[in-house]
Image: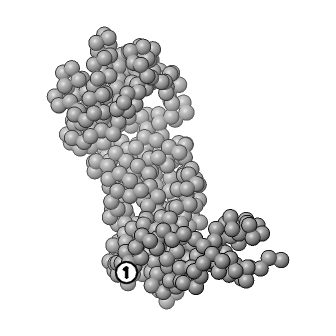
Amino acid sequence: MLKSQRIPPPASERGRAALGICARLNRAGFRALLAGGCVRDLILGVEPQDYDIATDARRKDVARLFTKTYSIGAAFGVEVVMLPEGHFEVATFRQDGPYEDGRHPSSVAFVDEERDAERRDFTVNALFYDAVREEVLDYVGGLDDLERGILRTVGDPVLRLNEDRLRLLRAVRFAARFNWPIETATWNAIRLCAPLVMKTSAERIRDELLKMLTEARPRRAMELLAETGLLGHVLPEVARMEGVEQPPEFHPEGDVFLHTLLMLEYMRNPTPTLALGVLLHDVGKPITQTFEDRIRFNYHDKVGAHEARNVCKRLRLSREQTARVVWLVANHMRLAAARRMREGRLQRFVREDGFDELLELARLDCLASHLDLEDIRWIEQYIAALGPAAAARAPLVTGKDLVGMGYVPGPLFTTILRAVDEAHLEGELETRDAALAYVRDRWPLD
């Protein structure tokens, strides 16, 4: 049954551009509506990140009406309109056939807007906005669910989740983002279908997880993943942290998983690499836990770095992102020893790429455990005292210099360059000639 509600039109430039697309299609005799998540966000008073348009026009009609377009789903009737304000997906109203691969329908039929609403994932994402009447159109009960603050699939939840298994993770993300409960039948279907999530591509799983970690309420997202059984499938390394006890004198907050959840809760606008670093920083603890004079996790940072690399590889993160996450996990214990470092080593450490993220991870680590921020404050004061000139100091010797001296590129390069840089920072070497002589004396060529 159709239900409607009046709301004001979007006021942003992208919103007005999307309405302009609808208006042009309307003038050409077609019906065009804003659709999906953008309508949900407008009702909630949130500026949408994207605006999608649904219409009874076909792709060729859209391409004919707009100067710059391209197709991203010819079989599904999706044409992208390119405007100065951005790119906008314009999709023909459709009804999907069977989803034989758990992601794409094997066929589509072009229908009316009501049938289009019925093939969407969640009721709150199946709303339309009629710009002519400034009215939200609801064919599936989405307005009632928005008012109650509840997440529910459109139609049969088992069928809907099986059509595209990524919806299992999307349900968790939306529920966490808006802090909504998941409707009982939908919740039961998620738990039933949880093992099927691994039939989704690693890249799609990665993207959903990163959104969970960098949007609002990452702690709630991880809790929901655990409660639905999804965590053990997508991040078994994190699931193993549940129930792993820690020494109460250092971790009065509880086990490793709870400690990690608290860190996630305290994060503010993290980068994807910082968020993953926080999530995985103690992933080595379940493997290294021992009960000696007290609970210990010897070398959990090194073991955790290995585990983090495996996670990043499985999720198909970029080489650069993987390197940063692994570095954060491997080094998260080093800040406690900063005051005991030699000056050259300490300066190298605080100048390393990504140190700002490491310092924030360490701050969160303290806040989620013993609350002692003295080491963090000391390092911040140390960096401030160094000033920008020290951070920008040019190296006395480069890899090119080593090649010119006859050294063969390889692991030894890193050892030599690090040693020269530390000696430079500590005042032992002042000139390039002295540095080159230092290299010849310590690493003579055969």
Q: Residue 47 in the image: state x and y as whole percent.
A: 26, 40
The C terminus sits in image quarter:
bottom right
Residue of label 1: 378
Q: Residue 320 in the image: state x and y as whole percent.
A: 55, 56
Q: Residue furthest right?
A: 446
Along the line of sight, which residue is nearer the eye, 203 or 385? 385
The three-letter amino acid code for the residue at tag 1 is Trp
For mark 1, give the secondary structure. helix
Q: Circle 1: is it few (<14), some (14-19), or many (20+) Cα within 10 Å?
A: few
Residue plotted at (18% across, 21% down): 133
Residue plotted at (42% across, 70% down): 388
Along the line of sight, which residue is nearer the eye, 317 or 238? 317
Q: Name the image quarter holding residue 384.
A: bottom left
Q: Decide: is 224 above or below 332.
A: above
Residue plotted at (53% across, 45% down): 203
Q: Residue furthest bottom?
A: 293
Q: Decide: is 42 above or below 214.
A: above
The N terminus sits in image quarter:
top left
Q: Name the image quarter holding residue 263.
A: bottom left
Residue 49 appears in view: yes
Q: Residue furthest top?
A: 29
Along the line of sight, which residue is nearer the eye, 399 or 59? 399
Residue 240 appears in view: no
Q: Name the image quarter holding residue 402.
A: bottom right
Q: Residue 370 in the image: state x and y as whole percent.
A: 35, 79
Residue plotted at (27% across, 33% down): 13
Q: Decide: is 115 above or below 353.
A: above
Q: How many numbered discs?
A: 1
Residue 254 vs residue 142: left or right? right
Residue 204 vs residue 185: left or right? right
Residue 364 vs residue 6: left or right? right
Q: Residue 236 in the image: state x and y as whole percent.
A: 52, 59
